[in-house]
Amino acid sequence: MRTCAQPEAVPGFLEALMRAFPKLKKRLQQQYEQVYPELREIIQYVIDEEVSNAWTMSPQFPHLVLPDLVAAHIAQLGLQPTFFERDKALAPSTLPEPRELPDRGLEQVYVSLMPGAVPTY
């Protein structure tokens, strides 16, 4: 079993990241400009500065930290951060809804979740 990414998958991931990152920057710019149209240059400056910080903090996943860095910087300026609306392109969550489990022993709960399985301690 391999625990690290396969080498042939890494270039594809990096290419996808390089294509998606400018789109994220543009979306951030558009969202903040909708709220603060008169602050276009300041918003661009904040985003550019935080892009640099995002690459420094998380070179493999800068797109994950960029929106939070921009929001924090905007808040430091005394402005209200904006939040992303859920992307319509994203698939709905495939995770099951949480459910209440009856008050039973651990073994019964385990078996109800995984029929035929026996817990090991």
Image (cartoon, rainbow, N blue to C red):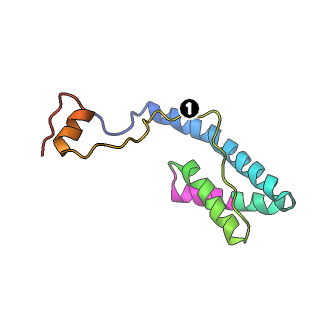
Residue 111 in the image: x percent, y percent?
Answer: 20, 34
- Whether residue 8 appears in magenta in the rendering, the answer is no
Disc 1 residue crowd, few under 14, some 14–19, many 20+, Cα 10 Å: few
Q: Residue furthest top?
A: 116
Q: Secondary structure at mark 1?
A: loop
- What residue do we see at 58% from left, 48% from top? 63
In the image shown, does 93 or 59 lie closer to the viewer?
93
- What residue do we see at 24% from left, 34% from top? 112
Residue 60 in the image: x percent, y percent?
Answer: 50, 48
| Vertical position of residue 5 compared to residue 103: above or below | above
Residue 66 in the image: x percent, y percent?
Answer: 61, 54
Q: Please identify the quarter of the rendering in which residue 23 is found.
A: top right
Q: Please identify the quarter of the rendering in which residue 82 is found.
A: bottom right
- What residue do we see at 65% from left, 59% from top? 70
3 with respect to 93 (left or right): left
Q: What secondary structure predominates along the stretch shown in magenta?
A: helix
Q: Residue furthest left?
A: 121
Residue tagged 1: 91
In the image shown, does 35 or 22 lie closer to the viewer?
35
Three-letter code, disc 1: Ala
- What residue do we see at 39% from left, 33% from top? 6
The quarter of the rendered structure image containing the N terminus is top left
Q: What range is drawn magenta here?
A: 48-59
| Vertical position of residue 15 compared to residue 46: above or below | above
